[in-house]
Image (tube, rainbow, N blue to C red):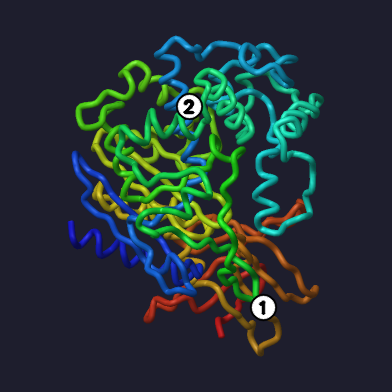
Amino acid sequence: MEKKFLQLEKIIRNYMRKYKIPGLAISIFQEDQTIYSKGFGARDLEAFLPMTPQTLIGIGSITKSLTAFGIMKLIERDKLSLDDSVSKYLNFAPFTSHLDIQIMHILSHSSGVPAADGGLASLFYTFGDYRKVFPASSRDDFIAHLGEPEDFIIFKPGEKFYYNNDMFTCLGFIIEKLTETSYSEFIRKEILEPLEMKRAVFSKEDFEKDPLNDKITGYMPKKEGDKMVPDKKPVPLYNYLNAPGGLYVSMEEMMHYAQCLLQKGSYKGIKLLSSHSFDELWTPRISSPYGYGKDPKYCLGWVYEEDYYPYTFVHHGGGLGTSCANFSLIPEKKLGVSVGQNSCTGIVSIIGRAALSLLLDLDPMIHVEELKISQVVDEISGVYKSSHDLYELKIYLKGTVLFADIEVDDGFMSFPLIPKQLKDLSFTVCSTLPMMRESIRFVRDQTTKRVKFATYDRYLYRKT
């Protein structure tokens, strides 16, 4: 096991260096205990404070699973039903004009309502982005923002997956209406306290007065010259973000949640949710693009896959600009992984799947495609010259897209590249022109095994 963790740590550190990630924390649960928990890098760069498994990190949309958990608790108390029309509880558009939108639909992003992102206004302003200024600060503003674009609702409930944060804010409204308390207080009393997640918070006040004073300073990637560097930003804590993604929690305490989920709603002998209600949470409702296998499904606040690992894979990710997290479970193996970072570069899902792969005795370099692609991109990136240095080929990564700047007898061209066959290092040149069916293939030196040549059309280029 120690050898696997050392391999995982090497992957983590390599990615942190490559993407200039200030800090990352990971905890792993198996069977009935936390088997690994560690922090890497800094939770605050200026103060040079280390990231720890106890550091509070914004988990973003993983919070949706807690909102769904809370809704199921209310269903058990006969407060509502999954097939109830949302209009029964919320007397505003689009629900009053689309009575067929049910509670189940907004829990599974299958309402047919495309995202309008009213609740994200606070994120834009927190980060100093005023390119999108619109009235959504008050509840009335938010409701109007949500309901006015009626002509954008062209699909019936159940027909189209539209990931919609505002729909989960509306679930928070429903919880508050039925419980006569705030969403955050309900989640705290009904879920966080029974799970002994004592430091988990939703509000800025509670975040600032954390008893351990172990919380992230947030960073966002900023371009300086040709490099991306961390840029310090405030962490967003705002009411309309709570139900869709507002929880700050340590990766260590997320293991309490993992234990409850892997025991189908029980924690230390306390039944928080019935087996029937728990099964409803993980019942697939609609196909989703948010996964890693061939046919991911969205349930109620969860992504469910059966073809990525040899076992059921249940997971969710989340991001808040200055932090992101990934939470993954393999129920058959009683295995859970939670990863968080104080920036949002998206590597947490890669790290989480690498950890699961290692613990399932799978090679992460084969099973986690991004790891293999990243390795190949590093190998092939650079400048190549044709014979006599006549023409140049440049391969480089721009954001998350691989580009080729190609010089031939007709002049210069620039194209995105799509992996065709990683095994033989061939990439498809992406173009809207129908005559462009060329590909670029990279060739290794037989002795050093390093990439030495690239071939495109009639030309061979040698790496400089």
User: In the rendered view, would you say 142 is above or below 364?
Assistant: above
Looking at the rendering, in which quadrant would you find the N terminus? bottom left
- Tell me the kind of residue under disc 1: Gly
User: In the rendered view, would you say 430 is above or below 237?
Assistant: below
- Tell me the kind of residue under disc 2: Leu
Dot 2: within a 10 Å radius of its alpha carbon, few (fewer than 14), some, or many (20 or more) residues?
Answer: many
User: In the rendered view, would you say 8 is above or below 359?
Assistant: below
Q: Residue at x 25, y 49 (%)?
A: 359
Give how far across and how far down residue 150 sits, in percent.
Answer: 79, 24
**Residue sitting nearer the eye, 206 or 404:** 206
Name the image quarter holding residue 413.
bottom right
**Which residue lies most toward the bottom here?**
388
> To which residue does mark 1 refer?
225
Would residue 139 be seen by someone viewing this image from the given angle?
Answer: yes
> To which residue does mark 2 refer?
300
Give the Cα distance between marks 2 and 1.
Answer: 43 Å
| Total marks in image | 2
